[in-house]
Image: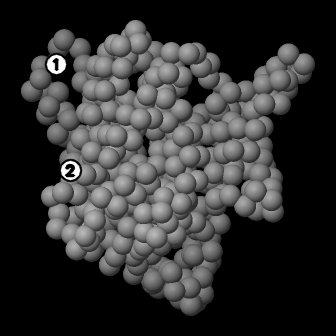
């Protein structure tokens, strides 16, 4: 594991340097594009240098993408992102963020699942309806890692930015719960009746979501009080924030509650109470610098890993056709899942369709969707779902990510 991580980290650093000096693309997009380019010589080496090809495949497999992201770096990335989000600005958009992260995810899940199921019937690909809903659940949440990394370099208004950031921070936790609930139904045996499954899903929601939010506030509050006592020891203050994430995540797994939601709440609480964005005193500077560097490191490794892992997949024409159709379905479902909740709110803007369009195009998918797809076995149509998920993620990060700034400029010029 250490050897694999070290090699991927080294590749990410080299690619970051190349992108910074020459490509000058948004970092995550540049890293992914360079990773996809690297796939070409790696694939060609399969017949010429089979030992090298096998060695490289082993590196990707050893890291175990799902465990590495969901049980590893996700908590660090969410905490780092939440640390710099202004609670005051978030509170002003709380209604829209809440509706997007809950009702929006549910609407998108069923729209995507339903239309994907119809498409598979039309092209003759086997995909049970409940498995289509699983796909809808894992692809509906926008990825906070991809969104926040790319929004840093997109020139959008603060109000719109906070809507997208806030939604992406919270809806992945909600999305995982929806995914887990549908997974319970998909794997339920005949011994379980509808009432029992419904009770399990309700309990899952209470434990994961409510438990995660409360737990995050508790560990965030304790960490904050410790940090506030260390004005002259910034190194120890940084260690305490790191302990909040590492110890807090381990505790969340033991308590069976949502670690992502807990880290978002803890990050928001600590970051805002110590005003980490001011960067004036030693503690603020140390925490700010440490988490920005750690965020860059893990983001680089994650997006290089997403790009490199694609060579392990075997795409066929049916998968490609379905993947292209899925891109359109996901975008249309995203539009509907933003439009419906947004229509329930009062707005000062004269043309809300512009905001809805940007929210739709700015709703990027990334590593979380791939990680959830990797958790599905063959009995749950895991192979098919993983392939179309990868196509959507590549389109989302490269095409949507590269063009979001231009879309904003065109709509508001």
Q: Position of residue 219 (x, y in %)?
A: 37, 65
Say few, some or many: other residues with alpha carbon within 10 Å of mark 1 (under 14 / 14 to 19 / 20 or more): few
> Is residue 152 visible from the viewing direction of this image?
yes
> Is residue 76 visible from the viewing direction of this image?
no
- Vertical relation: 218 (above or below) 259: below
Secondary structure under the numbered disc 2 in the rendered image: helix
- Vertical relation: 359 (above or below) 204: below
Residue 25 as seen in the image, left or right of residue 252: right
Which residue corresponds to the image point at 36% horizontal and 72% vertical from the top-left? 159
- Which residue is farthest left? 195
Which residue corresponds to the image point at 72% horizontal and 41% vertical from the top-left? 35
Tell me the quarter of the image containing the N terminus. top right
Residue 87, image quadrant: bottom left
- Which residue is farthest right? 48
Residue 305, image quadrant: top right
Mark number displayed over residue 143: none
Residue linked to disc 2: 340
Q: Position of residue 264 (x, y in %)?
A: 39, 61
Residue linked to disc 1: 192
């Amino acid at each position: 594991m250490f050897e694999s991580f070290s090699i991927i980290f080294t590749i990410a650093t080299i690619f970051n340097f190349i992108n910074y000096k020459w490509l000058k693309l948004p970092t995550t997009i540049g890293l992914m594009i360079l990773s996809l380019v690297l796939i070409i010589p790696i694939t060609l080496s399969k017949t010429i240098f089979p030992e090298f090809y096998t060695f490289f495949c082993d590196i990707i497999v050893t890291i175990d993408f799902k465990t590495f992201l969901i049980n590893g770096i996700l908590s660090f990335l969410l905490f780092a992102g939440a640390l710099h989000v202004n609670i005051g600005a978030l509170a002003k958009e709380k209604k829209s963020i809440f509706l997007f992260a809950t009702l929006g995810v549910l609407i998108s899940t069923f729209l995507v699942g339903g239309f994907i199921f119809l498409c598979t019937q039309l092209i003759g690909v086997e995909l049970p309806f409940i498995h289509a809903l699983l796909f809808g659940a894992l692809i509906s949440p926008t990825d906070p890692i991809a969104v926040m990394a790319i929004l840093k370099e997109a020139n959008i208004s603060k109000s719109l930015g906070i809507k997208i950031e806030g939604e992406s921070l919270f809806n992945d936790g909600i999305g995982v719960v929806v995914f887990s609930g549908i997974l319970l139904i998909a794997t339920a045996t005949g011994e379980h009746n509808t009432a029992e499954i419904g009770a399990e899903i309700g309990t899952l929601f209470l434990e994961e979501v409510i438990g995660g939010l409360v737990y995050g506030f508790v560990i965030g509050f304790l960490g904050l009080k410790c940090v506030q006592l260390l004005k002259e020891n910034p190194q120890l203050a940084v260690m305490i924030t790191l302990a909040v994430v590492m110890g807090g995540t381990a505790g969340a797994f033991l308590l069976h509650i949502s670690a992502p939601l807990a880290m978002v709440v803890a990050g928001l609480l600590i970051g805002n109470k110590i005003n980490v964005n001011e960067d004036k005193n030693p503690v603020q500077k140390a925490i700010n610098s440490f988490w920005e560097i750690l965020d860059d490191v893990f983001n680089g490794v994650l997006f290089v890993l997403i790009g490199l892992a694609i060579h392990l997949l075997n795409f066929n024409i049916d998968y490609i056709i379905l993947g292209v159709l899925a891109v359109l379905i996901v975008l249309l479902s995203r539009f509907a899942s933003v439009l419906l909740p947004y229509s329930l709110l009062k707005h000062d803007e004269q043309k809300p369709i512009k905001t809805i369009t940007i929210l739709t195009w700015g709703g990027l998918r990334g590593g979380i969707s791939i990680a959830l797809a990797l958790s599905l076995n063959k009995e749950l149509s895991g192979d098919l779902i993983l392939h179309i998920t990868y196509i959507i993620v590549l389109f989302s990060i490269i095409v949507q990510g590269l063009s979001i700034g231009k879309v904003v400029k065109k709509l508001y010029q």
